[in-house]
Amino acid sequence: MALHLHDTMRGKKVLFEPLVAGKVTMYLCGPTVYNYAHIGNARPAVVFDLLARLLRRSYELTFARNFTDVDDKINAAAIETGKPIGEITAHYIRAYVDDMGALGVQSPDIEPRATEHIAEMVEMITTLIDKGFAYEAESHVLFDVASFDDYGKLSRRDLRQMLAGARVEVAPYKRAPGDFVLWKPSPPELPGWDSPWGRGRPGWHIECSAMAEKHLGPTIDIHAGGQDLVFPHHENEVAQSTCAHGGEPFAHYWLHNGFLSIDSTKMSKSLGNVLLVHDMVRTNPGEVIRLALLSAHYRQPLDWSDSTLEAARRMLDRLYGAVRGIDIDTQLRQDAAPPKAFMAALEDDLNTPKALAEMFALAKKLNKAKDETERQSLAAGLLAAGELMGLMQGEAEDWFASGADGELSGEDIDGLLQEREDARMNKDFVLADGIRDRLAAAGITIEDGADGTRWRRSA
Ligand code: AMP
Ligand code: ZN
């Protein structure tokens, strides 16, 4: 099966065909670095890392993910903490790279920073003014949305309706309420760069257009980001880049991940329900978090709850349990390819729930297989699938030995014991023993008796 992806611009799943045979360019909107990434921010990083891994199997991929290191939220954080802006952004860039690394996110080929591309932004803004798509007013430069016929196409919004519905206080220097900022003046205490329009700083949208052009060219294959970015960020990127490049399309495929919520509620600071990856990776193996993020289809909403990580942990118990104790021939392992049905699922718009189901089906087959050659070959296929998913790269023994959980709750332990019981009923003793070992590693002793299994915490 050939790769199919859901393109937001066309509003449907389509066959992926790169612009240049054998090569793919991809841009992902990265974080604004003024705080630690939360679990929602990790979703695009992880799902598009998986897409990058998949693409690299067939194409020469150039993947860029930026850092927005100039932004009003960063300025506000500097004022609040009394720290220099550069110190804040350097700290959170490092933390982002470490935290995403812990989730198995591979480094993109290029990680451009907005502050290192101001000259390119000024150049693009100048082009937009020269071509009549932007105008200067009171030291600001604004994009004139009425000048671009296709404005609103990506987000399926009608410009006239948008203007009629605009109730926001319109800045006096704007010709129309929908016009957006390409450049704005900076007072002396804020970061600023000299420009033909005076000392100032760029708007957010122009940053990505300029960095994508610099590193990937005027037209790219894939542009990705979270669903919230479709409007206005990506709509505005399309307008800027298309108009600066004489009408050439900006991106051929637009991919957007769905939103992650916590207990059916939007994550927000004011509700105090923000889960930071930086904290989570201290008490959870990164691959558990990664698997949890991949357990839903990337376009669907993902609701995170207390049980999400525990469910992912149990899935890894099953997967590691299946390959445990199998000494796979090195060559066989190197040559192994992921199973066809697994690949077909991923190539179907990154259907990770289906791909995981294929991995579990394989694990089940493996648990039942008696013949050593067959077991080795199934295990090698399962590990190849795991490698592509960014999972199962540790040793199975280490997984069961680490008990890499925080304190297991009573509910968790009961759940694991039930899972062990089910495994024993299914004669899956590898899994059953693995669960016992994991409990032991977490300091839980279990005693099987006539009236069931009891557990206690070892002192
Ligand atoms: P930001 O740093 O706010 O620009 O966000 C970085 C990335 O995380 C963007 O692609 C956002 O669309 C994405 N994002 C933010 N919140 C969530 C969420 N709750 N669920 C999924 N993606 C999110
Ligand atoms: Zn962007």
Image (cartoon, rainbow, N blue to C red):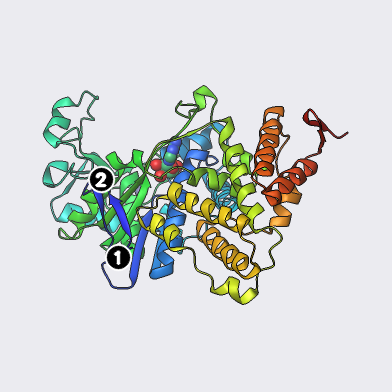
Q: Nearer the viewer, residue 4 or 25?
A: 4
Q: What residue would you read off at disc 2?
A: 236
Give the amino acid type for the residue marked by disc 1 in the picture. Answer: Gly
List x then y, in percent, for residue 96: 55, 48
> Dividing the picture into quarters, in which one does residue 381 lie?
bottom right
Query: For the residue with label 2, is its CB less than 8 Å from the closest atom of ligand 2?
Result: no
Q: Amino acid at mark 2?
A: Asn
Residue 363 visible within the image: yes
**Residue closest to the far right:** 459
Query: Residue drawn at (62%, 64%), measured in percent from left and top?
Result: 375
Label 1, on which residue?
A: 217
Q: Position of residue 233 (x, y in %)?
A: 31, 43
What is the x, y in percent for residue 20? 27, 71
Depicted 339 relative to depicted 403: above or below: below
Query: Quick check: can you spot residue 139?
Result: no
Say which quarter of the image contains residue 151. Answer: top left
Gap in angstroms between the C-alphas marked 1 and 2 = 18 Å
Quarter containing the C terminus: top right
Q: Residues within 10 Å of mark 2 (few under 14, many from 20)?
A: many
Q: Nearer the viewer, residue 393 or 8?
A: 393
Q: Please tell me which residue is depicted at 62% across the width and 40% down the height of the picture.
A: 280
- For the N terminus, the quadrant is bottom left
Viewer-proximal residue among 63 and 94: 63
Q: How many marks?
A: 2
